[in-house]
Amino acid sequence: MPHIYRCTLELHDSLYFATREIGRLYETEPILHNYGLCYALGFVDSDRHSTTVAEEHAYRYFCSEQVPKYEEHLTPLNQQGIYVTPARAVYHTAVLNTWKYANNNYHVEMEKTQKNIPSFGRAKEIAPESQFEFFVFSKNPLTFPRWIRLGKWMSKAEVAVTELPNPKRQSAKEFIFPYPLNPLDVMFTNQVLSYDTINMPPVSLIRNVRMVGEYYTFEGLSEPLKLPVNMHYRFSQ
């Protein structure tokens, strides 16, 4: 049986990434994508073609090119038996920040201008002390960093981890999974019947999923939990 961890993440800074853009408003959805969590937890070392030591947790603050390489970076986690689910908000509040900037065409395009016309935008961010929850599967025991950084501002967050006891694999049945999932990672091994869509890049997520498939149950929890089996990173062609 795999090692299955329930992880709680608490923000110590406001968190910003543009889930959607509505005019001048840039909004952060209270959902954390599983791709971003893999990088933040240190399971991916983007300076190498593959990750050989998951416990390394060496966070990289610089990328030489702004080209996503999710398939190249995350496929080695399949080989190591590591999978991270997206995170849902257990508790969250939002803050709205307004920022201003000046016309800088003369810097970018070498245009002459006599005008400096200020403009503005608004960013809806997730406030400090907001909490998120997600799950990590691994065929070998893992260690986790206590502190990670997320989002455009490299916001600081604290991670608390509990290993779930005595996972038992159940035969394929219909069940409902309320947590967010990456559809590419689950639809090939489970029959998804219905779901709600969360539109966000780079891959929209789903939640409140009614599905047929195998799942894990756990003894000794205060409330029943069913986690889908056979989730792996997959990528559209």
Image (cartoon, rainbow, N blue to C red):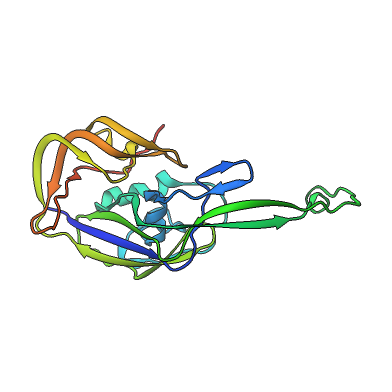
Q: Quadrant of the C terminus?
A: top left
Q: At 91% from the left edge and 52% from the top edge, which residue is drawn?
A: 114
Nearer to us in this view, 109 or 11: 11
| Residue 56: quadrant of the picture | bottom left
Count of all numbered marks drawn on residues in the image: 0
Confirm whether residue 53 shows in the render.
no
Residue at far bottom of view: 146
- Tell me: 2 left or right of 45: left
Residue at left offset 28%, top offset 60%: 7
Task: Kindly identify the residue that appears in the image at 21 percent across and 42 percent down.
Answer: 230
Q: Which residue appears at 38% of the width and 55% of the height?
A: 37
- Residue 40: give x, y in percent of width and height: 41, 60
Left or right: residue 43 compared with residue 220: right
On screen, residue 198 above or below 158: above
Q: Is residue 118 visible?
A: yes
Vertical arrangement, residue 27 with respect to residue 42, above or below: above
User: Which one is in front, 123 or 64?
Assistant: 123
* Coordinates of residue 206 in the picture (x, y in percent): 34, 38
Q: Position of residue 235 (x, y in %)?
A: 38, 38
